[in-house]
Amino acid sequence: MSCSYSLNNINICYLYHLLILFNIMILSPDVWGPHYWFTLHTIALSYPTSPNSVTKKKYYDFIQNFPLFIPVEEIGNTFSKILDKYPVTPYLDSRESFMRWMHFIHNKINIALELPSLTMEEAMSEYYKKYKPKAVESIDQYKRREKVAFIFCVLVMIMTGWFFYKE
């Protein structure tokens, strides 16, 4: 955060630097959570279709240690408990099973955080939307607006015709 110390923002900048100094910056899961999940799902999607024992061990270690890297201790502890209850080991034999396990765990965390669960298809659709080029998004938005405008025009014509027909 860059601070130009004017009278308007000196208190905010002072508080920000004080929090950093005492290492008590509050890291909101709303900010980092989606990025963590995107990374975890990317890791699952890039998992080998037929992994060897070394790969399985490395992925196992990564997943088991992952709670240590979660910025909010309570969420990290919840993640650890879920890992204890639903261990990854049986799901490391293939990419598909690892992806399904990751989706299952994501939903378990969402339930614990009182967030909505997604089906595997919905989750994959949301994941792949992130790769959609901005130009394609703009075209999709334009097409939606075009449809709304068309429907609006048709409704106006129907209402106008009805109004003149009535008289």
Image (tube, rainbow, N blue to C red):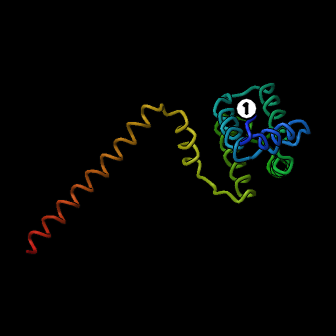
Q: Which quadrant of the view contains residue 89?
A: top right
For the point 66% across and 46% down, the residue is: 103
x and y percent of residue 21 in the render?
A: 89, 36
Pick whichever, 87 or 35, lies toward us: 35
- The quarter of the rendered structure image containing the C terminus is bottom left
The image shows residue 102, relative to residue 50, as above or below, that is: below
Residue displayed at 41% across by 37% down: 138
Q: Is residue 60 above or below residue 111?
A: above
Query: Depth check: 36 or 24 in front?
Result: 24
Looking at the rendered structure, the kind of residue marked 1 is: Ser
Q: State the image coordinates of residue 128 (x, y, percent, origin top left).
A: 54, 37
The vertical placement of 164 against 30, above or below, is below
For the residue pair 46 and 7, the one nearer the viewer reads as 7
Q: Which residue is mark 1?
A: 4
154 with respect to 161 (left or right): right
- Assign a secondary structure to mark 1: loop
How many labels sit on residues?
Answer: 1
Residue 112 found in image quarter: bottom right
* Callout 1 crowding tier (Cα within 10 Å): few <14, some 14–19, many ≥20: few
Residue 163, above or below 139: below
Residue 100 shown left or right of residue 23 in the figure = left
The residue depicted at 81 percent of the width and 45 percent of the height is 26
User: Given the current orientation, which residue lies at the most extreme right position?
Assistant: 22
Q: Residue furthest front?
A: 7
The quadrant in which the N terminus is found is: top right
Measured from the top left, where is residue 120 in percent x and y?
A: 59, 48
**Residue in the image at 67% along x and 42% along y:** 34
Q: 81 left or right of 43?
A: right
